[in-house]
Amino acid sequence: MVAAGARIESIALGGDHACAIVRGRPWCWGRNDYGQLGDGTTLERSVPGAVIGLPAPVTVIAASGGASPAHTCAVGGGRLFCWGSDSDYQLGNGADDGRSVPTLVSGGWLGVSSLAAGGRHSCLVSDGTVGCWGANGAGQLGVAPIGAGPSRSGAPRLVSLPGAATTVVAGSGHTCATLADAVWCWGENGDGALGDGSTTDRGEPVQVSGLDGAARGLSAGAAHTCALEGDAVWCWGANDHGQLGGGDRTSTRAPIQASTSRALAVSAGARHSCKLGADGVHCWGANDSGQAGSGEPSDVLEPQRVEVSAGPVTAVGAGRAFSCAALSEALYCWGDNRYGQLGNGVALTQGTPQPVTGLAGVPAQIAAGTGTSCAVVAGAAYCWGKNEQGQLGDGTTADRSTPARVVGLVEPVAAVACGEMHCCAGTAVGVHCWGHGGYGQLGNDATGSKSTPVTVVGLSGAPVTTLAAGFGHTCAVDQGALWCWGHNNYGQIGDGARTDRLTPVAIAALAGGVTAVAAGGWGWTGHSCAVASGEIWCWGYNGNGALGDGTDVTSGVPVRVQGVPAGASAIVAGGSSSCAIAGGTLYCWGSNDVGQLGDGANVSHRTAVAITSLGGAVSTVNMGGEVGCAVADGAVYCWGLGTRGQLGDGRLSSVPWPVVVAAPGPVQQLAVGGTHVCASSPFGMSCWGGDVFGQLGLGRPLSSATPVKVELGAAIE
């Protein structure tokens, strides 16, 4: 846990995923093949995403430390939930099926003060009592001698201990608990992780030897355990990489002292350990992925300081091969990042601390419409700018030059998208829209505008995290299937008709496997695009080749874009042009009268062309109207229409090639609204361009041709 009053209240590191509680709300990121992030999908996330369906406040969270399978548990609204893999009943609901959203643990447990998620088992402390469930092959449930207990349990079973427990922790196959005057452990013991002087597996608790007084700060790694006694760190068990911190690689069956300097907390990862002390963060053990933070890929046999220079650290965590340190309002991680577990928006392993984006007042997602901006911060949606049709969702039609919270949304919000004059949000229970509804783009089976969110009818009610909003239509991915609704004068809905749709219709031609969607349009036109199984498909208005199929023929059903290689990962749409990312390269097609394709010319293209003038691999792209922007190797570039300063480099003219924008970075998200652009980084949000309606969020209409900071902190206090 971290200091009282901090926005980041708790962190939990699993094998390849991480979670944090921010202002009572849980966020997770990293590997997600078993749904362990709790966002309703099995897609990896390189930035934090809200866990959906947990009642507030969330007070305790635990993430399993194994590489795979993985699960997570948390206490929300006083009740206990788990999600992710359920291969050995570790979710505790007796169902033996994995869940990508939280599910209640059997037994109606209340008052849970400590949680542990092991390799394939889970444990809790409630009113001093320990209960465990899941796999029990090595006796890690602690309920009976080896061979006499069940092989697994689908509901918590009580562990017999000689006193009241305060904390429980779990490794890959062992469990430990602190009592008032001792530490007790049980389960797998091949490397001495139980600390009882033996290597014999134990199906019932045994006392750790060699600790003279009350222990605190208990933590379990894959096959080793650490605890604080007095001011010192003591560790025992496996030591093949020096994770015990004693200066060698000899495993021990009883605690040895790892550090004599004053320690406040300790965390044991799979093969390394970290501690927080008055003198900062120190780590030791395996460092093949940079998890010990030494800058060298060799094992660290004794505690070594990790430089986290942004401020005083309040908590530290160790995962399988990565580590994190929490400040009161920021989080830094380092080490293995193959699954995005560092939370910095990229999948690049780092040997030094990197800021996690999307937490504590930093947007998790941003969106821009025509004169409107929105951001998701701490699970809530905030909008500002133009509001004549109620598109800010604050219950009024008055423009705002500072962020205002969207009212009436089921939180946490997982996604937000804005079109010409309407916006939508994805939540745990589907999609909600507000603003202009004249074409049915709000999806509520009506055509009236709304200044507060209304529920889109006809979807499954499952969590939605992928949305797109165009001039007068909207699309969403619901359980892998694509649905669209609203204006359909050019077939932009994709159902083969030209009739406006007031409720969602499924796009039959793309029956499944849709991972991204985009909605464009300008004036009265509209087109849509999607990534399905790595291929790009577009439909709707096709003036100047907006569909990329080599023709100018408008299509009411999806057509395959030509010129983009297989494996596309992102798609965006502007007024009558589109861009996609495939293999780190940007491809664009369609209208190019002001250089919005970024290829250095003003000639439209009916098939995709590669944009080779960017400075490296492209990670993010966005379009709006006649402007395009992208992030390549950490740098921001914009091109196209620039008469309002929306290119961000100080000029007020259009440019047909990418120009560098000095946006505070590293930038991880872009939102382009046509006359303005916004970007988010781990340090906040900045916008530039036109500000007629207050869309830059400065508190007064003041256009800027260079990035200016949006003060989101005041809005969410």
Image: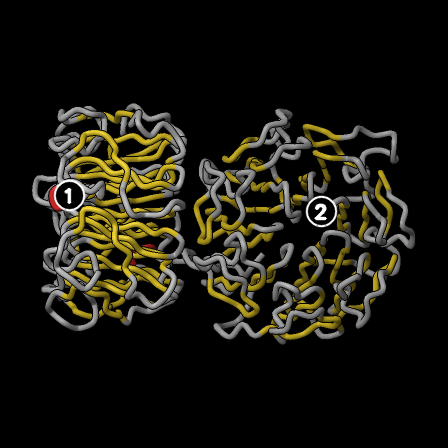
> 326 or 562, which is in the foreground?
562
Task: State the CA–CA distance, disc 1 to disc 2.
Answer: 53 Å
Question: Where residue 616 sits in the image (x, y, percent)?
Answer: 37, 65
Mark 1 or mark 2, whichever is nearer to me: 1
In the picture of the structure, the residue carrying the numbered disc 2 is: 170
At x 39%, y 56%, the residue is 584
Q: Residue 122 falls in which quadrant of the image? A: top right
At x 12%, y 65%, the residue is 654
At x 78%, y 40%, the residue is 140
Q: Residue 136 falls in which quadrant of the image? A: top right
Task: Please state, as top left, top right, bottom left or bottom right, where the N terminus lies in the image.
Answer: bottom right
> Which amino acid lies under the numbered mark 2 shown in the image of this protein?
Ala
> Which amino acid lies under the numbered mark 1 shown in the image of this protein?
Gly
Question: 390 left or right of 586?
Answer: left
Residue 530 is tagged as: none
In the picture of the structure, the residue carrying the numbered disc 1 is: 521
Question: Where residue 692 sits in the image (x, y, percent)?
Answer: 10, 59
Question: Where residue 483 sits in the image (x, y, percent)?
Answer: 29, 30
| Crowding at mark 1 (Cα within 10 Å: few <14, some 14-19, many 20+) | many
Looking at the image, residue 656 lies above or below residue 568 = below
Task: Please state, as top left, top right, bottom left or bottom right, where the C terminus lies in the image.
Answer: bottom left
Q: Earlier in the sequence, mark 1 or mark 2?
A: 2
Looking at the image, residue 305 lies above or below residue 91 = below
Do the residues under discs 1 and 2 have CB atoms within 8 angstroms?
A: no
Q: How is the image coloured?
A: secondary structure
Looking at the image, residue 392 lies above or below residue 325 = above
Question: Where residue 316 sits in the image (x, y, percent)?
Answer: 60, 62
Badge 1 marks a residue whose secondary structure is loop
Residue 407 in view (yes/no): no
